[in-house]
Image (cartoon, rainbow, N blue to C red):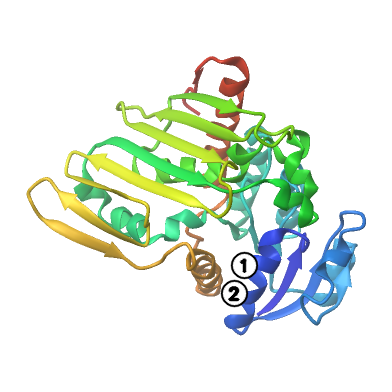
């Protein structure tokens, strides 16, 4: 397929998607970047034309599929632009900073049949896939926990995406960057709704206007508890931990690609497969395969609307010090 990449200065483009697309044998026909002065960050990335005008890119290159990225505050408008032009696309999370603005775009995409995938890649971890396939056997979830800690956010300034350090453009810090993975898996594995959100965050470690760490608690309609913790507090690298406790089983550990699941009837099973090194490639491959086959993506815009609503509630709770109750919708 002819692939165009918009928002090509996004770090995931050079760290994840270009390599994945090339390994899959896809043809990258154009790179686009409309942020002033940022197109130069794509120099040498792919041997193809580069554009600052997205309309011109689409008119001249006529891509079959678009990989789309932007500062978080600009994502919803970009998604709307793609849906209006009936262009099938992938977009990074969180797809915006206000779920109310994203919701009508998601509705239009669904109504018009526009393929719009969102990179909620934690769905591709081995233990997550294993649990999802057995969701009916798991029974009621008692407790879910997902921790994702990363290093100094100064790396975003070094990568030329300093907007990640500006709450007005990024929504917040790790809450809007990593939080979507945490919230999405609670919906994907545990509960169809979230009725209450409470969150707290810490600041001061790096002297940036964004938070260093956010801890959030979600409550489902049947009392399911989900706890997520995300941060930029590691000296370097990443720290992950995942656990799920239900009426039928328990599993937990730092290796989401290889985990033992303990059934309450005494059986033990191993969930092994995709690790952190695999999920972006698997997501890219699966997204394009589903598009070719006329199937919906694993995670699409409606999923991100639900998730972003909880993220926005968590931001409100952290700012006010009060829990936020979410009604039906």
Query: Which residue appears farthest toward the bottom when viewing the image?
Result: 25
The vertical placement of 103 against 222, above or below, is below
Q: Nearer the viewer, residue 261 or 131?
A: 261
Using residue 221 as the reference point, say whether residue 200 is left or right of it.
Answer: right
Image location (x, y in percent) of residue 155: 71, 52
Image location (x, y in percent) of residue 77: 76, 46
Using residue 235 as the reference point, say whether residue 272 is left or right of it.
Answer: left
Q: Quadrant of residue 164?
A: top right
Using residue 130 as the reference point, say whether residue 159 is left or right of it.
Answer: right
Can see residue 87?
no
The reply to whether discs 2 and 1 touch (Cβ–Cβ < 8 Å) is yes
Query: Which residue appears farthest toward the left when viewing the image?
Result: 265
Residue appearing at x 73%, y 35% in the figure: 208
Q: Nearer the viewer, residue 86 or 2?
A: 2
Residue matched to label 1? 16
Residue appearing at x 62%, y 59% in the figure: 114
Circle 2 packing at 10 Å, graded few (<14), some (14-19), many (20+), is some
Using residue 293 as the reference point, say whether residue 176 is left or right of it.
Answer: right
Query: Which residue appears farthest toward the front when viewing the image?
Result: 235
Q: Nearer the viewer, residue 93 or 111?
A: 93
C-alpha separation, residue under disc 2 versus residue under disc 1: 6 Å
Image location (x, y in percent) of residue 310: 53, 32
Residue appearing at x 56%, y 48% in the figure: 150
Callout 1 secondary element: helix
Residue appearing at x 57%, y 34% in the figure: 213
Which part of the image, by quadrant, shows the N terminus? bottom right
Q: Which mark is residue 20?
A: 2
Callout 2 secondary element: helix
The vertical placement of 110 against 32, above or below, is above
The vertical placement of 256 against 63, above or below, is above
The vertical placement of 161 against 280, above or below, is above
């Amino acid at each position: 397929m002819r692939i165009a990449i918009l928002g090509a200065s996004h770090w995931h483009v050079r760290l994840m998607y270009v390599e994945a697309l090339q390994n899959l044998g896809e043809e990258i026909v154009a790179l686009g970047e409309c942020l002033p002065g940022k197109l130069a960050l794509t120099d040498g990335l792919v041997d193809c034309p580069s554009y600052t005008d997205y309309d011109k890119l689409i008119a001249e290159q006529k891509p079959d599929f678009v990989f789309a990225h932007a500062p978080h505050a600009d994502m919803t408008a970009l998604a709307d632009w793609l849906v209006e032009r009936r262009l099938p696309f992938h977009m990074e999370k969180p797809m915006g900073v206000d779920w109310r603005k994203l919701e009508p775009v998601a509705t239009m995409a669904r109504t018009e049949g526009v393929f719009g995938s969102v990179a909620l890649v934690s769905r591709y971890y081995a233990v997550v896939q294993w649990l999802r396939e057995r969701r009916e056997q798991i029974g009621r979830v008692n407790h879910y926990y997902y921790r994702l800690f990363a290093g100094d956010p100064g790396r975003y300034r070094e990568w030329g995406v300093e907007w990640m350090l500006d709450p007005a453009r990024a929504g917040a810090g790790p809450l809007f960057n990593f939080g979507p993975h945490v919230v999405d898996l609670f919906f994907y594995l545990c509960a169809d709704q979230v009725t209450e959100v409470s969150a707290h965050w810490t600041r001061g470690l790096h002297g940036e206007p964004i938070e260093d760490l956010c801890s959030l608690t979600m409550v489902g309609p049947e009392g399911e508890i989900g706890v997520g913790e995300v941060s930029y507090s590691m000296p370097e690298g990443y720290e992950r931990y995942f656990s799920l406790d239900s009426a039928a089983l328990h599993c937990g550990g730092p290796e989401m690609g290889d985990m033992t699941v303990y059934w309450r009837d005494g059986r033990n099973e191993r969930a092994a497969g995709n690790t952190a090194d695999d999920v972006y490639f698997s997501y890219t491959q699966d997204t394009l395969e589903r598009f070719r086959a006329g199937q919906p993506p694993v995670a699409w815009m409606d999923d991100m609307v639900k998730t972003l609503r909880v993220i926005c509630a968590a931001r409100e709770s952290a700012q006010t010090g009060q829990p936020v109750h979410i009604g039906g919708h």
